[in-house]
Amino acid sequence: MPDSVPSQAVPQDPTLDQAALARALSGRHFIGGAFVPARSGRSFAVVNPATGLEIGAAAEGDAADVDAAVTNAAAAQKDWAKLPARKRGALVAACAAVIRAHVEELARLIAFETGKALRTESRVEANTVADILEFFGGLGSELKGESVPFAPGVLSVTVREPLGVVGAIIPWNVPLLLMALKIAPALVAGNAVVVKSAEEAPLTVLRICELMNRVLPAGVFNILSGFGPECGAPLVAHKLVRKVTFTGSVEVGRIVAKAAAEKIIPVTLELGGKSPMLVFADCDFEKTVTGAVTSMRFTRQGQSCTAASRIYVERPIFDRFVDALAARVDAMVMGDPLDEKTDIGTIISPEQFDKVSGFIAEGLATEGAVGRACAAMPEDAGLRKGLFIRPYIFTHLPADSRLVRQEIFGPVTCVFPFDDAETALAEANDSEYGLAASLWTNNLKRGLELAHRLEAGLVQINQNLVVQANLSYGGVKSSGLGKEASLESMLEHFMHKKTIMVNYS
Ligand code: ADP
């Protein structure tokens, strides 16, 4: 067992003092049921993007920490897998209750750490973690196999078995939700998990790990913070890691998939998106404008892989739709993420700020293009160094613009008019990505026909919900491999099927 850091500094009860909690959680991994510092003793700063102030530090993990976490996980997994599946599920569901008791604390901490507004994003995300744990916690008895007709006197059955230690690598945009989508099915299936958190959001997920470890046996859920190449790569490469589940960029997804291929282990990839929204003139106009506002995820500063970032609108309603959209976004409040009045918080980091600003500058410099800046910048002096970017709605961009082709991961949407459904469909499908899409029309026959032809893992008509437990979620093309969030995801991606044959003739 690793030497543990005295944990009394970390509050046992829910706390709404996010600054104190961030400090208390600083400089630690969670391995084998205890907080531990990085073996190297190194850590890196965690900065609140709304103020630019350092709020804590994260342990800087490397291969030695990975080895400690994976070794602990492998040892713990043996007994965990022996528990009846329903018992494992019950324990995961019991974790949900602990998370529910801490929702407000977790919501404040993630808002503090990532700049996502408390009311519109952070509280919703914290609640969703509990939902996901409850959902998978109830599926313990669904880990069924089949009987296979083979020959007289031979009983042939399949049984599902866990894979062993799962390495989970998560990004910063919705770290709580994305971590829950990985750990909940992995654990119920009988695996142990080692999570590598995102550099920009290491603290709230660490708190969740500690809270869940109050219920789970030590070692089945461990978490490391650190940088991708130094901590994420050794996790994927570790010989005892038998499955990797990754959410992040296409570029890193390729690196992870290649490393997994070296070991011949399965990998699930949830990568980027450039999700289209097709709006027909016969849609319910107000409902569709509301749907577009939600779909663009401007409340998350557009930092979402499913964000509707290309909106194709039938020409007769194009101008009216763009005006209505701009008016709605204009009315949104950008400001302190912890303020209940705030709709839109900040961009996560200076690097992302520069990247998104670069896209906007390029759009504004494009000949003929029109970019409308919406929503006012916050005036609070304490937020002067905050990474706020006004949301932009662009029209008249050429189809080959970088803004149309690449994932911006910022509050930028491109809107185009179309004259016929076939052209709109072709434009929507003309992307390297295929994560999600939505169609808005009262002609359901047309909607359904087009839904079948849209190249995306998730297509919705007249709604655009975010990830929901029980709905398989995952993309096609460069958007990824495999599904998350559903029973199928647990059975197919966190277990393998063994065939057992008995000859009783
Ligand atoms: P984003 O653009 O959302 O930051 P990234 O793909 O860069 O997405 O990062 C997602 C996660 O992948 C982060 O936890 C990051 O540390 C991790 N990561 C980055 N590089 C590697 C790598 N070479 N191997 C494993 N994980 C990595």
Image (cartoon, helix red, strand yellow):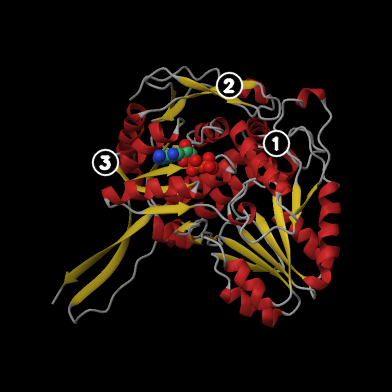
**Which disc number belongs to residue 200?**
none
* Residue 297 visible within the image: no
Spot occupied by residue 416 in the image (x, y as percentages of width and height): 72, 63
The answer to whether the residues at label 1 and label 3 have Cβ atoms under 8 Å apart is no
Decide: is 196 above or below 367: above
Residue holding disc 1 = 346
Residue 441 image-quadrant placement:
bottom right
Q: Give the residue at x 55% y 54%.
A: 135
When asked about the image quadrant of residue 463, the answer is bottom right
Give the mark, 3 or 2, whose residue is nearer the N terminus. 2
Q: Are marks 3 and 2 in contact (CB under 8 Å)?
A: no
Residue 125: give x, y in percent of width and height: 64, 44
Q: Name the residue carrying label 2.
A: 56
Which residue bears the numbered disc 3? Answer: 239
Q: Earlier in the sequence, mark 2 or mark 1?
A: 2
Q: Amino acid at mark 3?
A: Lys
Asked if residue 30 lies left or right of residue 146, the reply is right
Q: Camera-side residue: 114 or 277?
A: 277
* Foreground residue among 130 and 29: 29
The reply to whether residue 448 is in sight is: yes
Amino acid type, mark 2: Gly
**Does dot 1 land on a helix, a strand or a loop?**
loop
Disc 3 secondary structure class = loop
Marks 1/3: CA–CA distance: 39 Å
Q: Secondary structure at mark 2?
A: strand
Q: Nearer the viewer, mark 1 or mark 3?
A: 1
Q: Confirm or reject: label 2 Cβ below 8 Å from ligand 1.
A: no
Instruction: For marks 2 and 1, give the one nearer the viewer.
Output: 1
User: Relative to the observer, which residue lies in front, 411 or 449?
Assistant: 411
Residue type marked 1: Thr
